Amino acid sequence: MIVKNRFVSAALAVLTTTVLASPACAQLQCAGTLSKVALHPQYGTLQIDYGYGVHYLCSVIQNEGLFTPETCKAAYSLLLSAFHAQTEVRFFFADTYTTCADLPNWAALNPSPYHISLNRPAP
């Protein structure tokens, strides 16, 4: 269990360092509870659905948007934990999208979100 916790901690550190190095001001935030987290076995594409359609977030094989394969793997770990805990996930986007309904369905998020956070509901 210690090895798993170290991996998750390292993965979160990589994801936070890479993704948070982008713009600091959110133009759009979209939040929801994940109903789907999938990984395409041939293309390595991480696919998610949190209420606004299915999005291709990143690739564990090649760079895509702000994500390297390493940060995509960290995001996959983070989102799997959110999926199992049914924790709210919030994505922060630059000024390309004006509403969460504008996010493309069954397509890559371009540009990709520059920040992802998990939010525990208030007690």
Image (cartoon, helix red, strand yellow):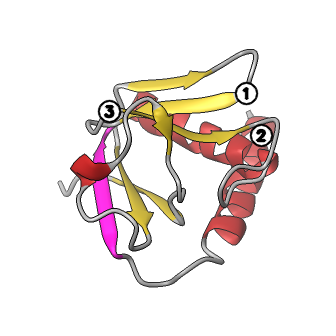
Which quadrant would the N terminus be assigned to in this image? top right
Residue 90 picture quarter: bottom left
Q: Which of 112 and 78 is in front in this view?
A: 112
Which quadrant would the C terminus be assigned to in this image? bottom left
Return the x and y of residue 26 as percentages of the image width and height: 38, 76
In the rendered structure, the answer to whether residue 27 lies left or right of residue 61 reads left
- Name the residue at 74% across, 24% down: 43
Q: Distance between the residues labelled 2 and 1?
A: 27 Å
Q: Nearer the viewer, residue 65 or 115?
A: 65
Residue 17: in magenta span: no
Residue 28: in magenta span: yes
The residue labelled by disc 1 is: 44
Residue extent of the magenta highlight: 27-33
Which numbered disc covers residue 2?
A: 2
Q: Is residue 49 above or below residue 111?
A: above
Query: Under tag 3, what secondary structure?
Result: loop
The residue labelled by disc 3 is: 53
Q: Distance between the residues labelled 3 and 2?
A: 35 Å
Amino acid at circle 1: Gly
Query: Under tag 2, what secondary structure?
Result: helix
Q: Which of 27 and 117 is in front in this view?
A: 27
Amino acid at circle 3: Gly
Do the residues under discs 3 and 1 have CB atoms within 8 angstroms? no
Return the x and y of residue 57 as percentages of the image width and height: 55, 42
Do the residues under discs 3 and 2 have CB atoms within 8 angstroms? no
- Name the residue at 65% across, 19% down: 40
